[in-house]
Amino acid sequence: MEHFHVYAKYRDSQGKSYRRFGFGYSLEKLRKTIVEPYNENKPFWLVGSRIYPSQVELLFIFRSSENKPQNIILPNGKTAIDEENFDYIVKCFLRRNIPSIFGDSTHNFIIPAKGVAARSI
């Protein structure tokens, strides 16, 4: 079964930067809670945070065979739940350094918005 992990980097109205990583979304939940609201320019919820598309600086959706972050072992030996550096996790996911992560699937779901990019971090 396929699962999806979502990473968002965004700024609040005061300019403070935040990073959120949500793990283990089913395709249906991903579409209903992230993709559809984002593509309709409506706020979406990610790990308890309400995020407006206009706040998003970076958004990635990763396809995976694993739904639990504690079962995703990073090259440094930590699990995805134990690693505090989200940038490191994203880099590992993008480089496909983890067998259960199939890479970046953002382009399959998200309509590109002005000013938002899936770029290297």
Image (spheres, helix red, strand yellow):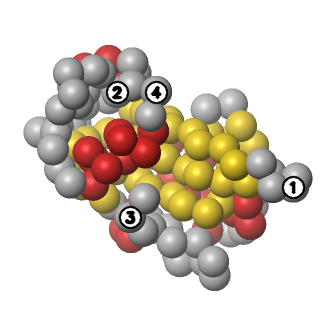
- Point out which mark residue 80 bears: 2
Kind of residue indicated by mark 2:
Ala
Dots 4, 2 in contact, CB < 8 A: no
The residue tagged 1 is 13
> Which residue is drawn at the image coordinates 73% and 54% (left, top)?
11
Label 1 residue SS: loop
Displayed quadrant of residue 58: bottom right
Instruction: Please give the label number shown on residue 84.
Output: 4
Q: Is the Cβ of the residue at disc 2 closer than 8 Å to that at disc 3?
A: no
Q: Residue at x 34, y 27 (%)?
A: 80
Closer to us: 77 or 94: 77
Q: CA distance from mark 3 to mark 1?
A: 24 Å
Q: Which amino acid is tagged 3?
A: Ser
Q: Tag 1: Cα neighbours inside 10 Å, few (<14), some, or many (≥20)? A: few
Above or below for 22 versus 54: above
Cα separation, mark 1 vs mark 4, equals 24 Å
Q: How many marks?
A: 4
Say which label, 1 or 4, has the lower sequence index. Answer: 1
Q: Which disc, if any, is residue 120?
A: 3
Residue at x 63% of width, y 81% of height: 114
Question: Does any portion of residue 68 appear in the rendered image?
Answer: no
> Answer yes or no: do the residues labelled 2 and 1 have beta carbons within 8 Å?
no
Q: In the rendered structure, are the residues bearing label 3 and label 1 in contact, judged by CB atoms less than 8 Å apart? A: no
Q: Distance between the Cα atoms at labels 3 and 4?
A: 19 Å
- CA separation, marks 2 and 1? 29 Å
- Judged from the image, the secondary structure of the residue bearing numbered disc 4 is loop
- Residue at the far left: name it: 99
Q: Quadrant of residue 78?
A: top left
**Amino acid at pointer 1:** Ser
Q: Vertical placement of 119 versus 28: above or below?
A: below
